[in-house]
Image: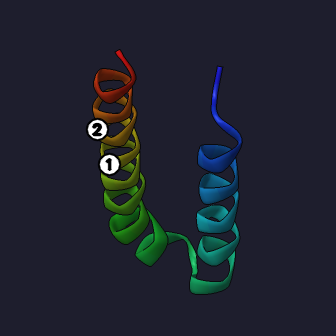
Amino acid sequence: MKSIGLYLVEHAVWKAGEVMGRYTWNLNTNLMVMYTRFMIQLTNEICFRCIQ
């Protein structure tokens, strides 16, 4: 299950890609999405440990 935040980020990135053009989008935003997912995952793990 995706979080709402991740869905919104991906949607915004996709829309930006439509404006920028596919080739540039593929190079730049794939890295951005991977980085964002990594940061969200990291944040979730840190928060989860704090709660316990």
What is the number of the mark on residue 39? Answer: 1
Q: Residue at x 69, y 55 (%)?
A: 8
Q: Residue at x 34, y 15 (%)?
A: 52
Work out whether 31 lies above or below 7. Answer: below
Tell me if 12 is positioned left or right of 28 in this view: right
Q: Where is residue 50, by image quadrant?
A: top left
Q: Position of residue 24 (x, y in %)?
A: 42, 77
Tell me if 33 is positioned left or right of 46 in this view: right
Say which amino acid is labelled 1: Met
- Judged from this view, the residue extending furthest toward the top is 52
**Contact (Cβ within 8 Å) of mark 2 with mark 1:** yes
Work out whether 50 lies above or below 38. Answer: above
- Please give the residue where the numbered disc 2 appears in the rendered image: 42
The residues bearing labels 2 and 1 have C-alpha atoms spaced at a distance of 5 Å
**Disc 2 element:** helix
Work out whether 1 lies above or below 29. Answer: above
Say which amino acid is labelled 2: Leu
Q: Residue 2 versus residue 13: which sits nearer the camera?
A: 2
Q: Position of residue 39 (x, y in %)?
A: 32, 48
Q: Residue 2 versus residue 30: which sits nearer the camera?
A: 2
**Disc 1 element:** helix
Crowd tier of the residue under label 1, counting other residues whose Cα lies within 10 Å: few below 14, some 14–19, many 20 or above: few
Tell me if 46 is positioned left or right of 7 in this view: left
Q: Where is residue 44, by image quadrant?
A: top left
Q: Residue at x 70, y 70 (%)?
A: 15
What is the number of the mark on residue 17? Answer: none
- Judged from this view, the residue extending furthest toward the bottom is 20
Q: Quadrant of the image for the N terminus? A: top right
Q: Position of residue 30 (x, y in %)?
A: 39, 56
Crowd tier of the residue under label 2, counting other residues whose Cα lies within 10 Å: few below 14, some 14–19, many 20 or above: few
